[in-house]
Image (cartoon, rainbow, N blue to C red):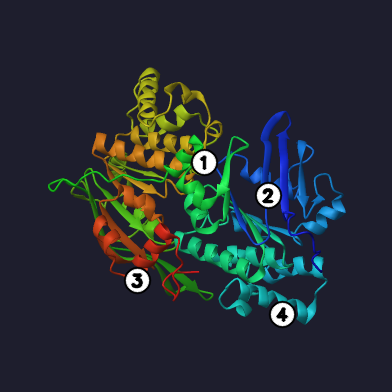
Amino acid sequence: MMKTEVNATVPLLEIRDLSVSFGELPAVKRVAFALNRGETLALVGQSGSGKSVSALSILQLLPYPHARHPGGSIRLRGEELLGAAPARLREVRGNQIAMVFQEPMTSLNPLHSIDKQIGETLLLHKGLSGARLRARILELLDLVGLPDAARRLNALPHELSGGQRQRVMIAMALANEPDILIADEPTTALDVTIQAQILKLLKDLQAKLGMAILFITHDLGIVRKLADRVCVMRAGEVVETGAVAELFADPRHPYTRQLLAAEPGGEPPPEVADAPEVMAGEALKVWFPLKRGAFGRVADHVKAVDGVTASVREGQTLGVVGESGSGKTTLGLALLRLLSSEGAIRFGGQRIDGLPNKALRPLRKGMQIVFQDPFGSLSPRLSVGEIVEEGLLVHGLAGDRAARRARVAQALEEVGLDPATQDRYPHEFSGGQRQRIAIARALALQPRLLVLDEPTSALDVSVQAQIVDLLRELQRRHRLAYVFISHDLRVVRALANHLLVMKGGRVVEAGPARRVFDRPQHPYTRALLAAALNLEAVDGGVVAT
């Protein structure tokens, strides 16, 4: 389709006084911004600020009629889209304006191969079929850097990595060469190394195709790297807008200054040389058998953890970092005896690797785990009080109801929550508050060790910083030992005394955290640091795609 030439002074996309309500609840209030040809505009703010609602309004993909627009204007090359006929909106969607979402696994059809999913878009808008369709699909997959594209045409989404799935999503979005690409948190669910690669890919594609990008994020580090201009949103309103360099140098609004100061920072607590060892694993192996044939003969193994040695002392944090699939979480579960493993495991100086479950049970209150997704790890059917007291009941530490409520109240108070909230349910809390509840549940048993499995990855940057400060304070107060599992080295740097860098089930680098950050020895560690701290993609097969 030929692109219509218009006056160069007219913005490609112009939003004026846009408002959105869900029923009687206002979600977006008089939002205004413009997007010019070839530029990148970032919409920034915490979860619930109205960023995604504003973006979905452009393509009118909100749940109408529950959603409505009390006022406003959305103009594409001067043409009003708000209230346009459905047939015209179908022409715009995917053809002139395309969208990439945060989580590709929920955006892709799990039952369709990737060639079928990209092909549907091309068939619908371009009428391509047969050899021409296949050639265009391969061209798009090559454009987004999917390795071995021809061999992956028949792959289902679950057979691809997170980064590969996101590349497929971008290929689908670019199929019709849109003028505007709306990218709604497209890297939040990805490892930092893959995140850096996807951001570089978007910039390269923008330069090659000349498209404008509306980038939605809560991460100001990404904005600094990617965007030309930025709109800061809070509670459904744009509170500040301007060129990226100017806004970072001289933020005017208090909320913008708060976002800029929100990155996790500070120093881990100082080490105590003679602190007792809390947990240690020696030559740990977790191998999952791969069985083939009619008789289920073991043909090979997935070496999830392969000969790892690690230890953590009282009041200290062991950071375990690496990409998805590196074995981080498996190591944490093995140390807690939640997975079968080979090798010696000590807790408080006692060998626990050979203990039966009955003998291990009394020790479990001393070692607790906090998971990545607080909504998934908290039962929606239990009140906050019931969730926190569950471990007390299991271990016979509860006492009567009054004693339990007092202990729950103490645990909630320790994590900065109002004890009066213990009769409410998880869905009534924000993501950061739910993670505080998960930490309170672990603290109620007065453990010596906490395994923290990506506890901040699903949270806004500003909330990440709050959780890091909380964990640091709890560690200082109770002399807790942490095994902190993460792919985000910005968070790890603020907490860890020692570092294990894992790749393919093995430790490729280990040592004091400060030394590893200042003088990384292994190419993989250097790639992780470049991606996490500078959003630089490292090529050459050092990291996965």
Q: Is residue 29 left or right of residue 542?
A: right
**Residue found farthest to the top:** 402
**Disc nearest the viewer among 2 and 4:** 2
Q: Name the spot of residue 401 as percent of width and height, x first.
A: 40, 20
Q: Name the spot of residue 531 as percent of width and height, x first.
A: 43, 62
Say if mark 1 contacts mark 2, CB within 8 Å: no
Q: Amino acid at mark 1?
A: Phe
Cα separation between marks 4 and 3: 37 Å
Residue situated in front as seen by the camera: 518 or 154: 518
Q: Using a 10 Å C-alpha cutoff, classify the residue at mark 2 as few (fewer than 14 neighbours), some (14 to 19) or many (20 or more).
A: some
Residue situated in front as seen by the camera: 85 or 160: 85
Check the picture and name the quadrant holding the N terminus.
bottom right
Q: Secondary structure at mark 4?
A: helix
Please tell me which residue is depicted at 45% across the width and 44% down the height of the picture: 260
**Disc nearest the viewer among 1 and 2:** 2
Q: Secondary structure at mark 3?
A: helix
Q: Name the spot of residue 122 as percent of width and height, x first.
A: 77, 69
Cα separation between marks 1 and 3: 36 Å
Q: Which residue is mark 2?
A: 34
